[in-house]
Image: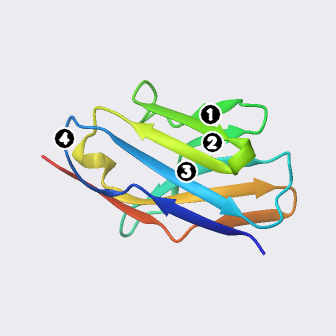
Amino acid sequence: QVHLEESGGGLVQAGGSLRLSCAASGSIASINYMGWYRQTPGNERELVATIHSTRITNYADSVKGRATISRDSAKNTVYLELNSLKPEDTAVYYCNLYWINHDYWGQGTQVTVSS
């Protein structure tokens, strides 16, 4: 059983920064993707950023240049730093852990950006 625990969400002013963390526990493959997705009411969950265990990263166009994803593989933890926050960044942010035939999600953490 794999469990993902997110932290770091909250209320932030536009232009500010935040750092989300997600710690995974359980039986986890050494080769995997960890990432962040977000969802707003009435919309599908969308990619924010992912990072492979080889440190290869991928970012959504909407956050390129403002986001940095990183990981501590020894701790099975992934981080997302998001700068120059905009009201449209407001969403529930979900942590994801994926490897072949395995796909796990955190419970989500609310990020609200006030204008």
Dot placed on the residue nearer the N-terminal end, 3 or 2? 3
Disc 2 packing (10 Å; few <14; some 14–19; many ≥20): many
Dot placed on the residue nearer the N-terminal end, 3 or 1? 3
Residue 89: percent from left, percent from top: 32, 47
Q: CA distance from mark 1 to mark 2?
A: 5 Å
Residue type marked 2: Thr
Judged from this view, the residue extending furthest toward the left is 115
Label pair 3/2, CB-CB below 8 angstroms: yes
Dot placed on the residue nearer the N-terminal end, 2 or 4? 4
Q: Secondary structure at mark 4?
A: loop
Residue 105: percent from left, percent from top: 62, 66
Residue 37: percent from left, percent from top: 53, 53
Label pair 1/2, CB-CB below 8 angstroms: yes
Residue type marked 3: Trp
Which residue position holds label 2?
50
Q: CA distance from mark 2 to mark 4?
A: 24 Å
Q: CA distance from mark 1 to mark 4?
A: 24 Å
Of the numbered discs in the image, which one, if any, rests on residue 14?
4
Q: Secondary structure at mark 1?
A: strand
Closer to us: 21 or 32: 21
For image coordinates 45% across by 49% down, the residue present is 20
Of the numbered discs in the image, which one, if any, rests on residue 36?
3
Which residue position holds label 1?
58
For image coordinates 81% across by 64% down, the residue present is 102
Q: Quadrant of residue 39?
A: bottom left
Dot placed on the residue nearer the N-terminal end, 1 or 2? 2
Quarter holding the N terminus?
bottom right
